[in-house]
Amino acid sequence: MPSRDINCLIEPFQSAVRKLIDECQDIPDFRVVETCRTLEEQKEKVRLGYSRTLNSKHLTGEAIDIFVRDYDPELYDRIYEKVKNMSYIIYPHYDLGWANSGFIDRMHFQFQKNKIIEEAT
């Protein structure tokens, strides 16, 4: 069974994910469906074609998968608009060009230690 425990995520990613959850109260059915995985779970994801790597950020507490209503691409785009302005969290679908790779993984968001957004005071 996939872990949904946000506490297994590394800091400061864990705090960024908590902020994302707060910011996404307006997104229908938004929820974190997977956080950390074991190597065995990752091997199964690769076997089933849900992932392409055994070197997943899920293994190190640096990734989450989310769900929104009907996997609606427009809702994922709305979440990306929020994430662009948040520290430590990226959307590889756009930020790393996964949308152009032929492998669609809209659910996946991950930690980026060098992404620091100055908060307005």
Image (cartoon, rainbow, N blue to C red):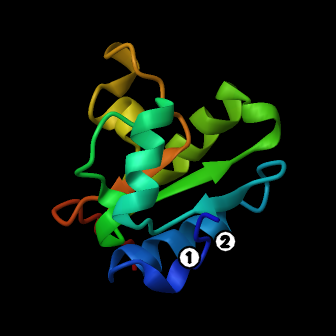
On the rendered image, what quadrant is the C terminus found in?
Answer: bottom left
| Viewer-nearest residue: 10 or 58 | 58
Task: Name the spot of residue 26 as percent of width and height, x first.
Answer: 79, 55
| Viewer-nearest residue: 5 or 43 | 43
Q: Is residue 19 above or below residue 28?
A: below
Task: Name the spot of residue 47 as percent of width and height, x first.
Answer: 43, 35
**Residue at 46% from the left image edge and 29% from the top image edge:** 49
Instruction: Check if mark 2's residue and mark 1's residue have beta carbons within 8 Å.
Output: yes
Residue 87 appears in the picture as rendered = no
**Residue at 72% from the left image edge and 33% from the top image edge:** 71
Task: Name the spot of residue 57 as percent of width and height, x first.
Answer: 30, 58
Q: Is residue 3 above or below residue 28?
A: below
- Disc 2 packing (10 Å; few <14; some 14–19; many ≥20): few
Looking at the picture, which amino acid does disc 2 mark?
Asp
Q: Quadrant of residue 85?
A: bottom left
Say which element carries label 1. helix
Q: Quadrant of residue 96?
A: top left
**Residue at 64% from the left image edge and 67% from the top image edge:** 21
The number of numbered badges drawn on the structure is 2
| Viewer-nearest residue: 107 or 115 | 107
Q: Is residue 120 above or below residue 104?
A: below
On the rendered image, what quadrant is the N terminus found in?
Answer: bottom right
Q: Is residue 59 above or below residue 42?
A: below
Looking at the picture, which amino acid does disc 1 mark?
Arg
- Which residue was labeled with disc 1? 18
In the rendered structure, the answer to whether residue 21 lies left or right of residue 71 reads left
CA–CA distance between discs 2 and 1?
6 Å
Say which element carries label 2. helix
Residue 29 appears in the picture as rendered = yes
- Disc 1 packing (10 Å; few <14; some 14–19; many ≥20): few
Q: Quadrant of residue 40?
A: bottom left
- Which residue was labeled with disc 2? 22
